[in-house]
Image: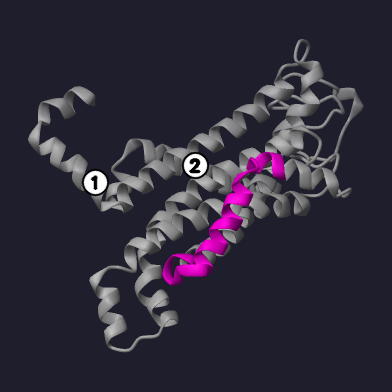
């Protein structure tokens, strides 16, 4: 925590993530109006006391819809990353530890999934399923989301299984299940956490992209991507319809990326020790970089 909070970039990322959580958790209290309460008299209204960020083409409050859109983005990100990380960690650990035919079979499946871009696979799945809902988006992103975690965990497991403490655990009679749970899994937590932080940003961006294409949440749902799509045709007369949802997406994605960079530096002792050694050997270079 000291290394994480000592980095200004990770501090900014942490504040941005906390802001997203607060907006999603307290959207009913922070919103000025119901996101579905549209008034035609306020159509394309600009920023004012009544509408802090203006109103959209239906007269709905953009500020309130952005707050409720944070709920959808956070829900999609957390569920997709949770399912993908859990499934990918299990598959990657089994493949890396046992090797042999199991490893070759699982790697073949990974290569088949990686032959298709993740977002293209998600578009195909959401286009095939006629229902438009957030659950369909989550399912589509989970189908391909576990692949990166499985490949990462497999590589880490191949390295850890040859460690001396794992060999000692086998020598005293520990079974494979207990070794993976007590010796291998704790060494996989740090890289998986870092990957999950970047995965949250990717999942939120993918959900916004699918909603922008009309393949995301149901029409009328306050989704940031859908708000961008709705504001496209009014860019010349009412740019605030697209600017504010776009800024929200940008800030959230940057926050998760900044936090992921900070976590990677804090949880990877090799990275932190390398930076510390460079600073001790050449402090003038560090000062110039700052």
Residue corresponding to mark 2? 256
Q: Earlier in the sequence, mark 2 or mark 1?
A: 2
Q: Nearer the viewer, residue 160 or 182?
A: 160
Q: Is residue 55 above or below residue 252?
A: above
Q: Is residue 245 magenta?
A: no
Residue at x-position 72% and y-position 55%? 139
Residue at x-position 76% and y-position 54%? 135
Res 85 quadrant in image? bottom right
x and y percentages locating residue 185 in the rendered image: 41, 69
Residue count near mark 1 (Cα–Cα under 10 Å), binned few <14, some 14–19, many ≥20: some
Q: Is residue 40 above or below residue 105?
A: above
Residue at x-position 91% and y-position 26%? 40
Residue corresponding to mark 1? 272
Please, what is the dominant secondary structure of the magenta stretch?
helix
**Dot 2: element:** helix
Q: Residue furthest left?
A: 281
Q: Between tags 2 and 1, which lies in front?
A: 1
Q: Quadrant of the C terminus?
A: top left
Q: Is residue 114 magenta?
A: yes
Badges 2 and 1: C-beta atoms under 8 Å apart?
Answer: no
Q: Nearer the viewer, residue 55 or 263?
A: 263
Query: What is the spatial separation of the Cα atoms under label 2 and label 1, in whole angstroms?
Result: 20 Å
Res 53 quadrant in image? top right
Tag of residue 243? none
Can residue 107 be spotted in the picture?
Answer: yes
Can residue 64 be spotted in the picture?
Answer: no
**Extent of the magenta region:** 95-121
Residue at x-position 54% and y-position 37%? 253
């Amino acid at each position: 925590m000291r290394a994480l909070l000592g980095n200004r970039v990770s501090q900014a990322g942490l504040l941005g993530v906390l802001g997203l959580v607060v907006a999603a958790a307290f959207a009913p209290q922070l919103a000025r109006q119901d996101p579905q309460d549209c008034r035609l008299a306020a159509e394309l209204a600009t920023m004012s006391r009544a509408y802090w960020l203006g109103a959209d083409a239906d007269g709905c409050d953009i500020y309130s819809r952005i707050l409720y859109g944070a709920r959808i983005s956070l829900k999609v990100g957390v569920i997709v990353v949770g399912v993908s990380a859990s499934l990918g960690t299990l598959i990657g650990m089994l493949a890396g530890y046992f090797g042999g035919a199991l490893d070759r079979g699982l790697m073949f499946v990974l290569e088949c999934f990686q032959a298709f871009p993740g977002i293209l696979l998600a578009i195909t799945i959401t286009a095939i399923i006629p229902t438009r809902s957030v659950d369909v988006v989550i399912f589509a992103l989970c189908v391909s989301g576990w692949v990166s975690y499985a490949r990462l965990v497999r590589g880490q497991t191949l390295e850890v299984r040859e460690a001396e403490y794992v060999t000692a655990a086998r020598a005293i009679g520990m079974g494979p299940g207990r070794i993976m749970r007590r010796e291998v899994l704790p060494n996989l937590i740090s890289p998986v956490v870092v990957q999950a932080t970047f995965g949250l940003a990717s999942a939120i961006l993918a959900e916004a992209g699918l909603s922008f294409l009309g393949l995301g949440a149901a029409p009328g749902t306050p989704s940031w991507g859908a708000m961008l799509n709705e504001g496209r045709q009014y860019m010349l007369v009412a740019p605030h319809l697209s600017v504010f949802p776009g800024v929200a997406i940008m800030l959230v994605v940057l926050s998760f990326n900044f936090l992921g960079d900070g976590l990677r530096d804090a949880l990877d002792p090799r990275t932190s020790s390398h930076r510390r050694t460079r600073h001790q050997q050449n402090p003038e270079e560090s000062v110039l970089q700052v």
